[in-house]
Image (cartoon, rainbow, N blue to C red):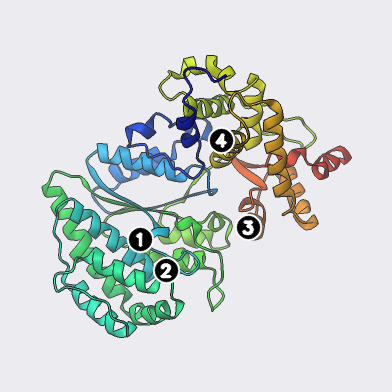
């Protein structure tokens, strides 16, 4: 029988792995757990300080990355909430709303930012009416040779939205649009800066705001596919064209693909933007082992916070120090909860996916058998994707605790075969705990 404090329907919704916690919303904030103390640094505080203290009212451009599903969006919403409390007007949006992530160009990013900022200003009752875009819309309609209806007073956001809708699902129209926009990129950038961002900053300050911040999330999901001339999309956008991305006349935070941290162009990337990209690591569940044959020990601070993350989903209104008493309402034993946290590897979304799978099978309190069934399915899914060559790569990472080069990043990190952690000695890489139980791995450990 369910405990009286547990609302099963509410718990089910709170465990949805695809739901991002929006820290600024009271109903979501109660689910938020701050992992900064175990992740090695408070990256969001560093991003915030750069904007508030180090900018001197000059625009800043910062880069943020990490595993997909490790909690970047939640942390960016925390940044948004903190900056808004400091008096900034923050425009947060997911790039996948506007862009085809398999085919992105610099003009797509600039127009997406222009649309989102314009729409946000309209909601704030700030009228900008950039003159250049009225001319651009008319010319684009002619270039695309497809009717797009614009009123003479069309808002920038509406005009760009109509263009995006026409081209997003048509590579042919998108190619035609880019051929027209590419030689005009600097003109478009200047117009965005002067007529849109510059005026927006001015009007916001008249209203007592500190300035404008744009947070462009999900750009880390840009496909790693090569352009026709051989450069991958991430390299082209952030290295080759990074100079234009950093020239926007406001504070900007971009999420970037993790592969760029392992690229031969990493030095050029950092130099181009003038900042070191911030990497959000996993929450450590075990201590660093110097030898693969050593049995890892639980990292208690990380495990404790992951326990709170699970318990907060069930009992958000209960004080954190009281939640541990309620473990029997969710799990048959405390060790079952520990097992869940440990096998997640400190990956936020994976932890929720495992919990969600348990909910699909039975009501709480979850049994040890139920969790083991879920873990077995997860392990089997990963094992199906690993080749013998990839096992060799994996063994090398376990021995060296390092991932080097784009190939290893693509193979091991994007596939979530290994996770990145950070401690007082720096960053290190460890095997996904669920793979550490695979026969292939245990045989290798025993042979070494």
Residue labelled with disc 4: 283
Hey, which quadrant is residue 342 in on the image? top right
Q: Residues within 10 Å of mark 1 (few under 14, many from 20)?
A: many
- Tell me if residue 286 can be seen: no
Callout 1: helix, strand or loop? loop
Earlier-in-chain disc, 3 versus 1: 1
CA distance for labels 3 and 1: 26 Å
425 above or below 365?
below
Residue 48 spot, x, y in % from top left? 34, 41
Earlier-in-chain disc, 2 versus 3: 2
CA distance for labels 4 and 2: 33 Å
Earlier-in-chain disc, 3 versus 4: 4
Callout 4: helix, strand or loop? loop
Callout 3: helix, strand or loop? helix
Residue labelled with disc 3: 410
Callout 2: helix, strand or loop? loop
CA distance for labels 2 and 3: 22 Å
Residue labelled with disc 1: 246
Residue labelled with disc 2: 241
């Amino acid at each position: 029988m369910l405990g009286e404090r547990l609302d099963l329907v509410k718990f089910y919704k709170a465990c949805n792995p695809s739901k991002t916690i929006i820290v600024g919303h009271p109903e979501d904030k109660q689910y938020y757990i701050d992992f900064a103390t175990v992740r090695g640094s408070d990256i969001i505080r560093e991003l915030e300080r750069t904007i508030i203290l180090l900018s001197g009212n000059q625009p800043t451009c910062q880069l943020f990355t990490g595993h997909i599903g490790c909690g970047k969006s939640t942390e960016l919403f925390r940044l948004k909430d903190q900056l808004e409390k400091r008096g900034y007007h923050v425009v947060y949006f997911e790039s996948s709303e506007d862009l085809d992530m398999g085919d992105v160009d610099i003009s797509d990013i600039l127009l997406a930012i222009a649309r989102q900022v314009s729409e946000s200003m309209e909601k704030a009752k700030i009228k900008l009416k950039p003159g250049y875009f009225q001319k651009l819309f008319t010319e684009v309609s002619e270039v695309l040779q497809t009717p797009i209806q614009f009123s003479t007073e069309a808002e920038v956001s509406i005009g760009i939205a109509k263009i995006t809708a026409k081209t997003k699902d048509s590579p042919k129209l998108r190619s035609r649009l880019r051929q027209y926009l590419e030689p005009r990129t600097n003109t478009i950038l200047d117009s965005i800066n002067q007529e849109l961002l510059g005026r927006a900053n001015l009007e916001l300050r008249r209203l007592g705001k500190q300035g404008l911040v744009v947070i462009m999330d999900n750009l880390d999901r840009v496909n790693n596919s090569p352009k026709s001339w051989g450069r991958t999309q991430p390299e082209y956008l952030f290295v080759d064209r990074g100079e234009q991305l950093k020239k926007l006349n406001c504070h900007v935070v971009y999420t970037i693909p993790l592969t760029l941290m392992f690229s031969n162009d990493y030095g050029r990337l950092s130099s181009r933007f003038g900042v070191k990209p911030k990497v959000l690591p996993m929450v450590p569940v075990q201590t660093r082992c110097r030898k693969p044959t050593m049995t890892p020990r639980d990292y208690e601070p990380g495990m404790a916070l992951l326990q709170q993350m699970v318990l907060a989903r069930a009992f958000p209104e209960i004080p954190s120090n009281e939640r541990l008493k309620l473990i029997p309402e969710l799990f048959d034993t405390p060790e079952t909860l520990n097992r869940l946290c440990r096998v997640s590897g400190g990956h936020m979304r994976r932890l929720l996916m495992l919990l969600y799978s348990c909910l699909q099978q039975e009501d709480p309190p979850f049994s040890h058998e139920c969790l083991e069934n879920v873990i077995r399915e997860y392990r089997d899914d990963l094992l199906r994707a690993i080749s013998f060559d990839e096992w060799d790569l994996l063994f090398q990472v376990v021995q060296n605790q390092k991932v080097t080069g784009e190939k290893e990043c693509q193979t091991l990190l994007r596939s979530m075969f290994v996770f990145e952690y950070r401690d007082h000695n720096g960053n290190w890489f460890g095997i996904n705990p669920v793979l550490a139980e695979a026969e292939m791995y245990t045989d290798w450990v025993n042979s070494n």
